[in-house]
Amino acid sequence: MVEAGLSTAGGLLVGAALLLAGRRLYWLVVGVAGFAIGFLLATGLFGADPGWMALVVGAVIGVAAALVAVLFQKVAVVAAGFLAAALLVLRALTVQGQETEWWVWLLAVLAGIVGGLITRWLFEAGLIVLSSLAGSALVVRTAGLSIGEYGEAIPFLALAALGIVVQAASLHRLRRESPTPPKAA
């Protein structure tokens, strides 16, 4: 009972951090996405039993991904985009009741490539959008938010929009307060 409460509180805390400050906590985005994908791989593809083994695999992949994020920021940003987009596709398809068959993983990899490219080309905006989506998914899933026939879609989209607005406003405020460097003549 206490374990479940701590797990829920931890999931909500990490989800809220990603949702509202994911751009600044990119290493957390990478680590959480790495954990989630490692966990899904261990359970879906390899049928990791007992459950603690899936947690260990997820934790190892998550910690490794976060370390790479800290040590190699440019690579980590692309990895964050890849992992977050892949995770979103995996979550969306498993919520719809799809098994984690080969084609689900293929779609996740393709979405990951697109997510990685978005974060490479649009660094700040990509981090804001992907961390807001990942944070929203984590909060909605952990809290069990659902609205009638729409299920998790409306809370997910509302929280994602809130995260995007909060993080974009924070970035705008930061840019406004930072002095601009003099232009070269």
Image (cartoon, grey):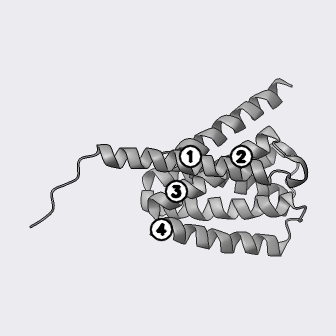
Query: Mark 3 sits on what residue?
Result: 127
Closest to the observer: 109 or 134? 134
Q: Earlier in the sequence, mark 4 or mark 2?
A: 4
Q: Earlier in the sequence, mark 2 or mark 1?
A: 1
Q: In the orientation shown, which residue stands out farthest toward the left?
A: 185
Rendering coords of residue 35 (x, y %): 68, 50
Q: Is residue 86 above or below residue 154?
A: below
Q: Earlier in the sequence, mark 1 or mark 4?
A: 1
Q: Is residue 9 above or below residue 88?
A: above
Mark 2: secondary structure: helix
Q: Residues within 10 Å of mark 3 (few under 14, many from 20)?
A: many
For residue 95, the mark is: none
Rendering coords of residue 57 (x, y %): 72, 51
Q: Nearer the viewer, mark 2 or mark 1?
A: 2
Query: Mark 2 sits on what residue?
Result: 138
Callout 2–callout 1 Cβ contact below 8 Å: no
Q: Is residue 108 above or below residue 9?
A: below
Q: Earlier in the sequence, mark 3 or mark 4?
A: 4
Question: Marks 3 and 1, Cα distance to the nearest angstrom?
Answer: 11 Å
Is residue 27 among the parts visible in the rendering? Answer: no
Kind of residue sitting beneath label 2: Leu
Question: Marks 2 and 3, Cα distance to the nearest angstrom?
Answer: 16 Å
Q: Residues within 10 Å of mark 4 (few under 14, many from 20)?
A: many
Mark 1: secondary structure: helix
Query: Mark 1 sits on what residue?
Result: 28
